[in-house]
Every structure is written in structure tokens, then in C-alpha cells.
Amino acid sequence: MKCPGGLSCAVERRWPGLMEQLPTIPEAGASLLRTIVVALFVLTFIVEPFLIPSGSMEPTLLVGDFLLANRQVFAPSGPLGRLILPYGKVQRGDIVVFYHPKPALLVKRVVGVPGDRLRLVHGHVWINGKPVYEPYARFRPSVPDAYRDNFPWKVYADPEINPDWWRQMRRLTHNGQLTIPAGEYFVLGDNRNHSDDSRFWGFVPRRAILAKPLVIYFSLNETASKGRREGANDRLTKKQGFVANLTGFARWNRIFRVVH
């Protein structure tokens, strides 16, 4: 059959048989719809995006980091969890996203699990009488705080401490060590001197733990994200060219960095 002309005719002359291989409009639409459904399923049940708003987890997570977190890894064990992503239990050293009454969601590192006897010595974690190796922890300059740095402290002197937590902490403290009860976890920020964490408001229940960060998929620099963190520098910098501004709004070296 003679080609009637037009773009399709030109394509057929250039690449014989190609037009028969290309999908029709209904086929292309169905393929796009399947892609959207799969993407929505993944974002709803498997991974979830988060933005880091504060510096409490520096240097592991920075203000302006965009995370993808695995929602399935800490979900109740079942066919979905085992078939798509492996199910695991919360372990010491894990970074976790969890619900907290105020604010709604937080991200911290688990440093104590049920049954651990925990204390802090000059900000460093000791578990069951032994110091813990913490290469992720940072101790930026700050005002000395005996309660924060030598936990659990004997004196109630900080108005930021939840009074209910103080009473519970005293009941669970023996020989200078806090025993973590069943079903509860003790969390700290990696930016140890500038983090609002379990030292001030208490344990995180297992049921409140939502997800585990997987990867940083994008990261805005501090100016672009308008983040506020301890020690932020507000000085003006010299004006730079268009290319520098275009490439400088993001931390390109952090993109696709695995979180651990």
C-alpha cells in the first residue's frame, strides 16, 4: 500500500516498520496510568519523603536535606513487608522517624533499646557499664549543662524537662543508670549539644516509630532552604555570577547519599 505522505510516511521511509512498533495513544495512556499507580503505591505504603528542618542531627542530616524513608522496615511482619522490603526490628544505632505529640514527627538516632542500662558521661553514651563507639556524634560548643551531659542527673533544675518524664526517670534510675523498659526506646540527636530528645521528654514507644531513612534524594543549601540552625552565619557574601548561583543552591555532593 502506497504511503499517503506526511510525517508518518517520512518516518516509515526512514525506518521501515517503526510505526507498527510504536504504541497507540490508548496504549501509551494505559502505560502512563500504570506508572502513576505504582508510584502512588510506593509513596503510600513503602517509602515516604521528608524534609529536615533543624540541625539536631548534624552532621548526618543537614537542614534542607530531602529524605526518602522506608515505611515497611518497621511495619508489622506480613506478606507485603516480606515480599517487597525485608522486615526488621529497631536496633541500637538506627536512625528513625517517629511520631511525637509536639511536634508531630521527629527524626533521631536510637541509642538505647529495651533492657539497656543507659547513662551519659560528658555527653557520651554508656550502655550496661561500657562506653559506646559513636563516630556520628558531634559536640559543638555550647553552654555547660550538667543535666544534658551527665544523664540521668539527680537534680531537677531545667524548666524544659517534662515533669512526668522526670518522675518516671527517677523511678527507673538505679546506681546512676537508667533502665529502658520493654517496648520503649531512648533516642538522641547526633548534634549532641543542640538536640531536643529523650533526655528532656522521655522514651519513644515502639508503636510510634514510623520509618527508617534510606537516602538523601536532594539537598538545598542553608541559604536556599532558609533553615535555622545553631551557629548559622548571617553575614552577607559577595555577589556571584549567574552560573555560581545556579549551581550553588543545592548540595550536589549529598544527593543519593545513603543515610546511616
Image: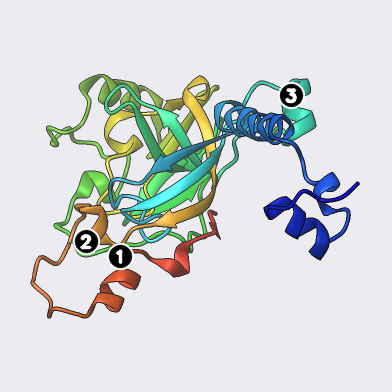
Percent x, y of residue 7? 68, 54
Write down the residue under mark 2. Answer: 223
Instruction: Tell me if residue 180 can be seen.
Output: no
| Front tag of 1 and 3 | 1
- Residue 5 x/y as whole percent: 73, 52
- Residue 31 place in picture, x, y as percent: 71, 34
In terms of image quadrants, where is residue 24? top right
Mark 2–mark 1 contact, CB under 8 Å? yes
Tell me the element at label 2: helix
Residue 142 % position (x, y):
17, 59
Q: Nearer the viewer, mark 2 or mark 1?
A: 1
Q: Secondary structure at mark 3?
A: helix
Q: Quadrant of the C terminus?
A: bottom right
Question: How far is mark 1 from mark 3, CA to CA?
Answer: 39 Å
Q: CA distance from mark 2 to mark 1?
A: 8 Å
Mark 2: few/some/many CA within 10 Å (<14, 14-19, 20+): some
Which disc number belongs to residue 74?
A: none
Q: Do the residues bearing badges 1 and 3 touch, measured as CB atoms within 8 Å?
A: no
Q: Nearer the viewer, mark 2 or mark 3?
A: 2
Q: Is residue 73 left or right of residue 82?
A: left
Q: Is residue 87 left or right of residue 61?
A: right
Using the image as rendered, state which of residue 83 and residue 31 is in the foreground: 31
- Disc with the residue nearer the chain's start (2 vs 1): 2
Separation of residues labelled 2 and 3 (CA atoms): 41 Å
The residue beneath circle 3 is: 80
Q: Is residue 6 left or right of residue 110?
A: right
Q: Earlier in the sequence, mark 2 or mark 3?
A: 3
Identify the residue under disc 1: 249
- Tell me which residue sits at (12%, 32%) in the image: 159
Q: Say few, some or many: other residues with alpha carbon within 10 Å of mark 3 (under 14 / 14 to 19 / 20 or more).
A: some
